[in-house]
């Protein structure tokens, strides 16, 4: 099976298109981008022997062939064609087991695994729970696969909360924050609630994050610690705003606003 660089072909088309539409400003070109893309996808292409780029991958019906193409594009570091991505997602359940195996394969590149995760998410296909929990617990930052795994778990139900919290103490610091992000959508676990409150009061650099989690969790008990947090002397202005918003979301009255003279964000906003 031949590998075509769809991105390069589209950029060639785009240059020709813009030459035929002289005088367009940059923002006007951006506004007409979708029009340009649709035109390219639906026009017979000489480099595809007259086939339309948007329909080219419809010839493939076997999941193995499509997954092989996916892996080959990633291996060669060629931009993954949107029509190939869409074809795999459209076939749904027949391709899902192959994508799960890619995600499970630790020898695979993060780029390939992340693409497979994204495809499964677009299929609304539930990933194996234990796999998602492993990815979350091992994640070091937002560039890892943990965030994508978390999005998959959020599409489920509250039954995921206890297994997540069972792994909480052994997770990375970023993994712990991601676990609580998932748990904030399902207010059923006291340990999760307590860790959100603890983070609010002790995690100096992430107080706004924990305030947001408590707002999502929706438990009015959090109003009291949030009221205390907004009076902390080492609270920065942006986190302060998140804390006040959380209080209001939970039905509380944050009271009169504090001033933050000297805080860069506060001064910048005040001087606008």
Image (tube, rainbow, N blue to C red):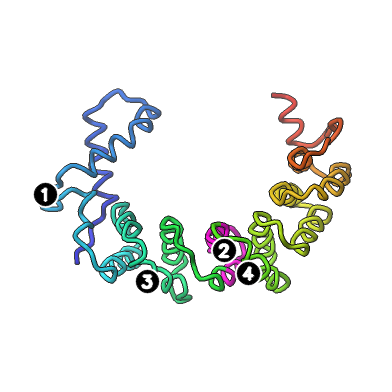
Please report the residue visible at 21 percent of the width from the left and 42 percent of the height from the top. Answer: 42
> Which comes before the other along the chain, label 4 or label 1?
1
Please report the residue visible at 72 percent of the width from the left and 46 percent of the height from the top. Answer: 215
Q: Which residue is mark 2?
A: 146
Q: Which residue is mark 1?
A: 50
Using residue 142 as the reference point, say whether residue 96 is left or right of it. Answer: left
Circles 4 and 2 in contact, beta carbons < 8 Å: yes
Is the residue marked by circle 3 packed among few (<14), some (14-19), or many (20+) residues within 10 Å?
A: some
Q: Which residue is mark 3?
A: 98
Residue 66, placed above or below residue 242: below
Q: Which residue is mark 4?
A: 137
- What range is drawn magenta here? 133-154
Q: CA distance from mark 4 to mark 1?
A: 49 Å
Q: Which x, y percent locates residue 120? A: 43, 61
Is the residue marked by circle 4 packed among few (<14), some (14-19), or many (20+) residues within 10 Å?
A: many
Using residue 109 as the reference point, say whether residue 174 is left or right of it. Answer: right
Secondary structure of the residue carrying numbered label 1: loop
Secondary structure of the residue carrying numbered label 2: helix
Q: Which x, y percent locates residue 149? A: 54, 63
> Which comes before the other along the chain, label 3 or label 1?
1
Q: CA distance from mark 3 to mark 2?
A: 20 Å
Q: CA distance from mark 3 to mark 1?
A: 31 Å
For marks 3 and 1, give the one nearer the viewer: 3
> Which comes before the other along the chain, label 3 or label 4?
3
């Amino acid at each position: 099976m031949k590998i075509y660089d769809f991105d390069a072909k589209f950029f060639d088309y785009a240059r020709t298109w813009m030459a035929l539409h002289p005088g367009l400003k940059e923002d006007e070109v951006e506004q007409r981008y979708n029009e340009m893309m649709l035109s390219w996808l639906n026009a017979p292409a000489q480099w595809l022997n007259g086939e339309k780029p948007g329909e080219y991958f419809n010839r493939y019906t076997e999941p193995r062939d499509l997954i092989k193409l996916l892996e080959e594009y990633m291996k060669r570091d060629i931009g993954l064609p949107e029509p190939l991505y869409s074809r795999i997602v459209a076939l749904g359940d027949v391709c899902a087991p192959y994508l799960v195996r890619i995600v499970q394969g630790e020898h695979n590149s993060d780029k390939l695994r992340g693409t497979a995760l994204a495809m499964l998410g677009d299929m609304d296909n539930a990933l194996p729970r234990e796999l998602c929990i492993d990815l979350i617990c091992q994640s070091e930052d937002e560039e890892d696969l943990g965030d994508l795994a978390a999005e998959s778990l959020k599409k489920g139900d509250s039954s995921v909360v206890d297994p997540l919290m069972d792994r909480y103490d052994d997770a990375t610091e970023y993994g712990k924050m991601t676990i609580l992000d998932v748990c904030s959508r399902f207010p059923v676990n006291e340990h999760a609630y307590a860790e959100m409150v603890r983070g609010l009061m002790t995690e100096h650099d992430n107080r706004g994050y924990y305030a947001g989690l408590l707002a999502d969790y929706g438990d009015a008990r959090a109003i009291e610690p949030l009221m205390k947090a907004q009076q902390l002397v080492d609270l920065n202005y942006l986190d302060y705003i998140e804390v006040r918003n959380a209080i209001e979301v939970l039905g509380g009255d944050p009271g009169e606003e504090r001033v933050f003279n000297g805080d860069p964000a506060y001064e910048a906003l005040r001087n606008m």
